[in-house]
């Protein structure tokens, strides 16, 4: 069974709602999933998981400070996370608020650790985004992200 972790930061509840939809999708795909607020997460949570999905609101085109601090602390895992599957999602106040740069900010850190990134050729390509509130479309994309990330992790684990 695939073990997945969804690590998120949410100040207003929007990103948490998105994280819950990601968890739902990952569970539908058969994973054992742990959803953790970044303030409670540790780098060891990444060691125990086959897949890790990160969510953050957009602050000045980047992920929130607590997410960046978490990634700074993952230096202790350097070289130990190779081949795990990663993905990200983001929220912002405005359509041009930097959602994609926020997602890429998180994906850059995952790539440095050797994660395999789950993209989407048919949905939100880099990862799901919510503008203002997490509407039905954003939540649907989050569920899809959870499913697709677990499906990829399952294929890699089998192979």
Image (cartoon, rainbow, N blue to C red):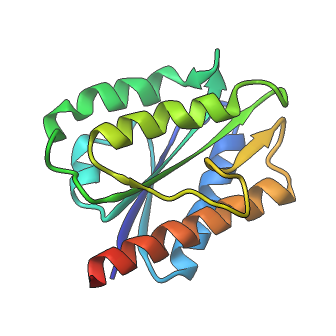
Q: Residue at x 60, y 71 (%)?
A: 25
- Residue 73 x, y percent position in the rendering: 25, 29
> Where does the N terminus fall, quadrant-wise?
bottom left
As drawn, is 143 to the left or to the right of 112? right
Give the answer, above or below, for where 71 lies relative to 36: above
Tell which of 99 and 25 is nearer to you.
Answer: 99
Tell which of 147 and 67 is nearer to you.
Answer: 147
Q: Residue at x 42, y 25 (%)?
A: 68
> Furthest residue to the front?
121
Q: Residue at x 83, y 42 (%)?
A: 133
The image quarter in which residue 110 lies:
top left
- Residue 157 x, y percent position in the rendering: 28, 77
Give the answer, above or below, for where 118 lies relative to 95: below
Tell which of 38 and 52 is nearer to you.
Answer: 52
> How many marks can you see?
0
- Residue 152 x, y percent position in the rendering: 44, 72
> Where does the C terminus fall, quadrant-wise?
bottom left
As drawn, is 74 to the left or to the right of 65? left
Tell which of 14 and 52 is nearer to you.
Answer: 52
């Amino acid at each position: 069974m695939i073990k997945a972790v969804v690590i998120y930061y949410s100040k207003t509840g929007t990103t948490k709602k998105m994280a819950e939809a990601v968890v739902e999708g990952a569970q539908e795909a058969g994973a054992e999933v742990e959803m953790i607020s970044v303030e409670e997460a540790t780098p060891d949570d990444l060691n125990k998981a086959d897949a890790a999905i990160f969510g953050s609101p957009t602050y000045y085109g980047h992920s929130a400070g607590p997410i960046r601090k978490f990634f700074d602390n993952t230096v202790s895992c350097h070289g130990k996370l190779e081949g795990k599957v990663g993905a990200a999602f983001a929220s912002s106040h405005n359509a041009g608020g930097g959602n994609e740069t926020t997602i890429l900010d998180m994906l850059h850190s995952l790539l440095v650790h050797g994660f395999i990134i789950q993209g989407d050729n048919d949905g939100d390509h880099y990862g799901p985004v919510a503008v203002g509130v997490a509407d039905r479309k954003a939540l649907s994309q989050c569920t899809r992200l959870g499913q697709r990330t677990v499906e990829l992790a399952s294929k890699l684990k089998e192979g």
